[in-house]
Each structure stands twice: as structure tokens, then as C-alpha cells.
Image: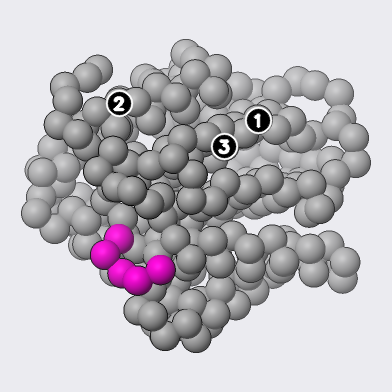
């Protein structure tokens, strides 16, 4: 887990004509960048990918990818190289690249996206282990098929769905002791944000004991916003703050504002 990182891959449904035929060859990625955004329109809506390096780091260990499958399906991924370990940025990049390759294989062989995602994460896990560098990464992955989405995650990179009226419709639970304590009612959100162990993570890509948590299918409504992000976002913003920052802005504006507020908090600057 990297407490000093922030990135997000966001998608919002819209009423629009079908996009041109797309495939995994049209994938878009952000690797080891200081501050960069990418816009993409696919059949299921519009997406904005944004990576911003922590103000306290010289290397961004985060990677993100948008992997279109066809006019109505795509896979989104955010991976966060575990801070303090060797080659964290290499591990996160491998997660994204192995998922891309697995999705391409699935399309070529008429396999389910679910199979592709599980294969990609398992292959990435073995590849990171084979590096023998002690490196690791988290992973947050979403399978999008028309308005229906399914989440997959390893570690404390998270996934949320926010409605246009400000309701948090979905939020994954991080694989981390503090998050489990919040879910059990032992800690509240304020206590968790300040807890000395808030950066500990209990499940990573690059572990012989890695497990993949698969969520139920969820149907997006028009104007819902789907967001994937590293722990850099969730360790610095409360859920209601995240909702407020994304619900009234365009995707590029929301991503930029999220990055600014998180960066200020990491740097100890008071901001809204």
C-alpha cells in the first residue's frame, strides 16, 4: 500500500449514440506520471483517467488502465504499488498489463470477462512473486457490460458508485485491519482517518496468499459516476467529501479537484 499516492479512473453513463467498434487494442494507460489525465468516450459512456503523484514522493507507484472490449463493454483498473517495497511501480504496471493481455485473450477465444479478469490478476500475482524483489501492488478492477458493472479488488484501492443526487450506491471495503474495524463498528470514520495503522494492508498482488474479492453485479443509472482510486484518496477524504466533490462537476473537473484536495492534505495544507 502506498499512503502517498492518488489516482482515479472514472466512468459516467450518458445517453449517446453507439461509439465506433473498439477492442483491447484501443486500451489507454497511465504509468508513473507526475500529473496527467486522459479522456475517452466508449459506448457505455465517457471516462476520465487521472494520475497525480503525491507531493511527498519523487516516483508515482500507481498505474491505471481503460481496456475497451467492444461497443458496450470495458474493463477499468487501478493498481497501487505497495509503498516502501522494491519496484512498487513495476508491480502496479504488471497488474495493468497482465489484465490487458488476459482481456485480449478472452476476446479472441470468446471467454467471459470475469474469466479474463481472474486470469489476469492470478497471472500478475505469479509474475510479481517471480520478480523476487519483495514488491507488491493492490488492484481495483471493474467489469462494465452496458449499464451492468461488477467489481473485483485486492488490497485497499477502492471502488465507489455515486448517484447524481449524492447517494453513495456502492463502496468496496478495503482489505486492511482499520477498514475491517470500521465495518464492524469498532472505529468510526474519524478515528480510522487518524489511526496509526491506517496504512496497513492485508491482501496484495504479489503474495502466495492473495485472494480476489468479487462483488455482486450492480446496474448503473443515467448520470451515476463510477470511480476507482488508490488508498491515497480514501485515506484523506471522507465518503461524504468524495461524493460532494464529484457529483456536481464534469469528470475532468472532479478528478482535478479531488487530486488538489488530497495533495493539500498530504502536504498538511488546509483545503476544502
Label 3 Cα crowd, 10 Å radius (few <14 / some 14-19 / many 20+): many
Residue closest to the eye, 217 or 34: 34
- Residue 96 location in percent, x, y? 59, 60
Which residue is the site of mark 1?
A: 39
- Which residues lie in the magenta part? 83-87
Residue closest to the eye, 55 or 2: 55
Quarter where residue 133 is shown: bottom left
Give the mark nearest the N terminus, 1 or 2: 1
Inter-mark Cα distance, 1 to 2: 21 Å
Q: Residue furthest right?
A: 21
Which residue is the site of mark 3?
A: 49
Which residue is the site of mark 2?
A: 261
Give the mark nearest the N terminus, 3 or 1: 1
Considering only vertical position in the picture, is 28 above or below 214?
above
- Residue 122 location in percent, x, y? 56, 76
Q: Secondary structure at mark 3?
A: strand
- Whether residue 153 is visible here, answered yes or no, is no
Quadrant the C terminus occupies: top left
Inter-mark Cα distance, 3 to 1: 7 Å
Inter-mark Cα distance, 3 to 2: 17 Å
| Residue sitting at x 80%, y 69% | 105
Magenta residues, dominant SS class: loop
Considering only vertical position in the picture, is 229 above or below 204?
above
Q: Secondary structure at mark 1?
A: strand
Q: Secondary structure at mark 2?
A: helix
Amino acid at each position: 500500500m502506498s499512503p502517498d499516492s492518488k489516482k482515479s479512473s472514472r466512468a459516467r453513463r450518458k445517453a449517446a449514440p453507439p461509439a465506433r467498434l473498439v477492442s483491447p487494442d484501443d486500451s489507454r494507460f497511465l504509468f508513473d506520471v507526475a500529473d496527467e489525465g486522459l479522456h475517452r468516450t466508449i459506448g457505455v459512456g465517457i471516462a476520465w483517467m487521472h494520475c497525480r503523484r503525491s507531493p511527498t514522493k519523487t516516483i508515482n507507484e500507481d498505474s491505471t488502465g481503460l481496456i475497451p472490449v467492444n461497443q458496450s463493454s470495458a474493463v477499468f483498473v487501478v493498481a497501487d504499488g505497495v509503498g516502501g517495497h522494491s519496484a512498487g511501480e513495476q508491480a502496479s504496471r504488471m497488474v495493468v498489463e497482465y489484465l490487458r493481455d488476459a482481456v485480449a485473450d478472452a476476446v479472441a477465444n470468446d471467454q467471459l470477462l470475469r474469466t479474463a479478469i481472474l486470469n489476469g490478476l492470478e497471472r500478475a500475482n505469479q509474475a510479481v512473486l517471480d520478480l523476487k524483489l519483495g514488491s507488491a501492488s493492490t488492484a481495483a478492477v471493474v467489469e462494465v457490460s452496458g449499464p451492468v458493472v461488477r467489481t473485483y479488488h485486492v488490497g485497499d484501492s477502492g471502488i465507489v458508485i455515486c448517484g447524481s443526487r449524492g447517494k453513495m450506491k456502492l463502496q468496496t471495503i478495503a482489505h486492511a485491519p482499520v477498514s475491517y474495524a470500521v465495518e464492524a463498528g469498532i472505529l468510526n470514520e474519524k478515528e480510522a482517518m487518524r489511526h496509526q495503522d491506517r496504512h496497513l494492508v492485508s491482501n496484495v498482488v504479489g503474495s502466495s496468499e492473495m485472494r480476489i474479492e468479487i462483488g455482486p453485479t450492480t446496474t448503473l443509472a443515467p448520470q451515476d459516476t463510477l470511480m476507482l482510486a488508490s488508498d491515497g484518496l480514501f485515506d484523506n477524504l471522507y465518503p461524504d467529501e468524495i461524493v460532494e466533490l464529484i457529483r456536481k462537476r464534469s469528470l475532468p473537473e472532479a478528478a482535478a479537484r479531488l487530486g488538489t484536495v488530497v495533495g493539500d492534505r498530504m502536504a498538511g495544507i488546509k483545503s476544502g
